[in-house]
Amino acid sequence: MKKVAIITGASRGIGRECAKILARNGITVIASYNKSEKQARSLKEELKKENIEIDIFKADVTNKYEIKQMVEYVLQKYGKIDVLVNNAGISQIKLFTDITDDDWENMIKTNLSSVFYMTREVLPNMIHNKNGCIINISSVWGITGASCEVHYSAAKAGVIGMTKALAKEVGPSNIRVNTIAPGVIDTDMNKDLTKEELQELEEEIPVKRIGKPEDIANCVKWIVNDAYITGQTIQIDRRMDIKIIFYIQKRRHFVNVSF
Ligand code: NAP
């Protein structure tokens, strides 16, 4: 019987690539989106040309009622959920002292509370089936911390903590929970970086290139196919030295400040 996977934030970037790779590997995919309906439809069309059917579903991951509706839809149609990829997320570069209440709440809601809401809806079915694989997309900033991205780093660190704790709690039910912590990946999230900044970043990455969404999606596929690994945080790929992004952020935000 085919595995069933929900991937949040699958209209663009990393989530879109995860949807393609899992669907091409024979998994029934439900690709969720929020604002980018056109891109979600184009993903469905792209796969249809390869004779692969996927479902797309609009659900704002900050809204627990929309999440509930999506999970109910999937359970009614497919009867089970084997894989959950909590990928949807936002980023923001701001000085800590400029972060507003709204910035903070929006960041935590979208990048951390969403993982709680999604997982809470999906887990009862996984526990019932004694089978499940949850993959949370965090960030290397959740491990190292990033200057001018304190709220993002806090949310992503929270995802790592949630992964480790939940992995212990649901391991006996044969449910595995892992985190992938990407470095810099070529998606809309980094579209504001200049060509020069990207080149500087590449210098500090071991294989000397920015990651591609498929670099993350391939790891997602590997974790889904594995049957044992749990509670882990896999970094893809960690910079040997993270000082460059620090300088880029400083250049942009501290131009009038001396250290
Ligand atoms: P992206 O290209 O900007 O795509 C973000 C995706 O998240 C979109 O599909 C978007 O859907 C969805 N999303 C955002 N807010 C949402 C909401 N409230 N409800 C539902 N979906 C929502 O970003 P990406 O680079 O692929 O990032 C994917 C994940 O990887 C994020 O968690 C991000 O933090 C993490 N990450 C990325 C990088 C990187 O360098 N790119 C590095 C480390 C970690 P709509 O457009 O349909 O609203």
Image: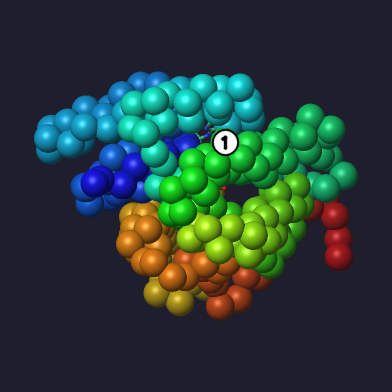
Q: Position of residue 46 (x, y in %)?
A: 21, 33
**Image coloring type:** rainbow
Please give the name of the residue rendered at 71% of the width and 54% of the height, measured from the top-left corner.
Answer: 158
Looking at the image, which residue sits at the far front? 128
Check the image and report above or below for 94 versus 55: below
User: Residue 49 appears in which quarter of the rendering?
Assistant: top left
Looking at the image, which residue is at 52% across and 67% down? Answer: 230
Q: Secondary structure at mark 1?
A: helix
Please tell me which residue is depicted at 65% across the width and 42% down the height of the picture. 116
The part of the image, by quadrant, that contains residue 192 is: top right
Residue 236 place in picture, x, y as percent: 47, 66
- Closer to the camera in the image, 192 or 141: 141
Q: Amino acid at mark 1?
A: Glu
Residue that mark 1 sits on = 121
| Front residue of this view, candidates 4 and 180 | 4
Residue 201 can be seen in this image: no
